[in-house]
Image: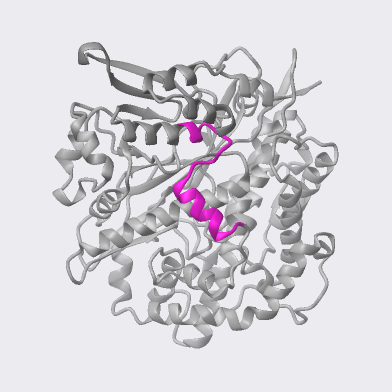
Amino acid sequence: MTKRTTSNASECVLPKLCGADIELGNFIAGIEQIGGTGFDASHALLAEIKGLPVRPGNYFDSYWSTASAIPKVEEDAHTESCGLKGNSIYNPQDVSRRFLAGNGGSAYIDLNHAELCLPEVVSAFDHLAAWHGMLRIAKTALDSANEDRPAGQKIHVLVNNTDGLGHSYGSHLNFLISRRTFDNILFRKAHYLQFLASFQVSSILLTGQGKVGSENGRPNTSYQISQRADFFETLQGVQTTYNRPLINARDETLCGQIGSDDPRAPARWHVIFFDSALAHGSCLFRVGPMQMVLTLLELGLVNPRLILDDPLLALQLFSHDPTLKARAALIGGQRTTALELQCAFLNEVKRHAAQGVFVGVVPRFEEIIALWENTLNLLVEKDLMALAPRLDWVLKLMAIERAMEQNPNLDWDSPETKVIDHLYSSLDADGLYRAYEASGFTEQLVTPERIAHFSRNPPSDTRAWTRAMLLRRAIDDRVEVNTVDWDRITFRIKGRHNWPSYRTLALADPLGFTQAHAESIFEDCTDFNDLLDGLESLPVGESLVNDAIAVN
Amino acid sequence: MRFLQRPNDPQQNHAGADNDSDSGERLQQIRAQSDSLLAAGDDAIQRALAGSNSEAFLRSTRQLGGQ
């Protein structure tokens, strides 16, 4: 991370650290239940994922789960011996959360979906590797869970965002931005919000997974670019499961209490817009360009000529037209295609990149811009063959068209066509993306080794490194982990005469507690209390101050 | 029905590929192989189509709307 010292900055730019979650489609084929099989499938999957409970007790886990759903993890014996039994408030959107000592991420159940949360990363390329690393964890869990299923039943896991029956589930991103930028977008400068919404809407060309048909009362269509587009109904709001907003206003910092009066105070920008991705290009484009557009907003570099008159209407038009000819109005009255608008955003980013605004803020921004430009050029050329290895919606469309060519009885309304749509993202051996990847067809922007690394190890350049290492040490030292959250961990430690005491380590600074900051402390401290003393001695918020870049 | 046309000339030049030659060359190589490689998905497609009851499968995918 490039460090720039700031002093008396009236504005600042924070490195665009990114978190993410993957909400999985999970169900059991071979049995039919009213309301579906998501409950059983998600619990069976989560039972196979190792982790440490976040809350002091699993009363409702015990209440709800079957014996087969009790985690078969090495930490279990440790957890039980530590007496992690008690009461907790049942929240159907956050059931049985456990943090992973491997990579510092977490897993839990959200409304009967197994949900995987990536550890915080700074680089979009690391996001891509960590995303697929988490999918490897899910695949391993799936294989184990299916070993225990009765004959004729099989758990399926789909990395998608809709069941085709009118239910959508998200894959959310979170970006570190300044509190001032957060307030500007949501509460002070409406054109900032419209600028961001317009960028997101046009970016489905890069990030959409593709979907057969329409849902949620939208006009019929054969194939559309985005899985989620049909479900967005309002411009902004805090809600995520109904009347979904293009711009989500959830204010959940997860950065402790770092000074809110400081313009460099961190905020967490929560994005519910994007589809889940499998293709490396689509996955990278969810994060890299967003990092840069948020940086422009942080700097006040907003070009109002790129703002759509009605982003919600434009999203429907753009998504429902994979020929890329649909046009929507800008506030200036001109009508633009999604591709033209994306090219305009790219040019805006390139113009400011030449001024150095992304240095130290968006790692490898030159590579991301080059890939972005190359992809938009290929879209202009409609070079399907070149785009399919990189973009999910194109690859899925080609696969379905190929199936139709080989099976003349198929059409867009055939149930078999929708089955192909679903199985595109299956993690199991029946997955189409997996088949194309195994054949070498898909473009690989990170190596399999890097993906394997992030399935077992945390990023070195965020607080996730210390989170994972602390959990590992606690397991080794048999120290009870009382609670874990993204910005703190509380331990129950035996003190004098075996009287327990609780110690909480604040991990407020997401850019702090990195390997560079903390590794020597882990190496030097054999006693757990000494280790916490050492970590507590790290200045809180120092990284945010030093990594923030002043704007004069 | 095809939504997107394939290019007549798969070797045609692209402005972006000129500017970022590594990425462009990689994609040119992929394009040259892609037709045969796309066939790698055929088995998976045929397995999907061979499923005994597509409608039952589609019913089983039912989920709750998530967060």
Q: Residue at x 50, y 87 (%)?
A: A406
**Which of the 4 image quadrants contains residue A91?**
top left
The quarter of the image holding the N terminus of chain A is top right
Q: What is the magenta range?
A: A446-466
Pick the residue in front: A57 or A65.
A57
* Residue A449 among magenta residues: yes
Residue A163 % position (x, y): 38, 59
> What colouring does the structure picture have?
one colour
Residue A350 visible from this viewpoint = yes
Residue B49 % position (x, y): 39, 80
Q: Residue at x 33, y 56 (%)?
A: A141
Does residue A305 lie above or below A178 as drawn?
below
Q: Residue at x 27, y 44 (%)?
A: A74
- Is B27 displayed left or right of A37 in the figure? right
Pick the residue in front: A446 or A472.
A472
Residue A166 visible from this viewpoint = no
Residue A122 % position (x, y): 61, 39
Residue A87 % position (x, y): 19, 26
- Is A522 displayed left or right of B61 in the figure? right
Pick the residue in front: A321 or A388.
A388
Pick the residue in front: A365 or A184.
A365
Does residue A184 lie above or below A93 as drawn?
above
* Residue B64 among magenta residues: no
The quarter of the image holding the C terminus of chain A is top right
Does residue A166 lie above or below A399 as drawn?
above
Q: Residue at x 46, y 26 (%)?
A: A487
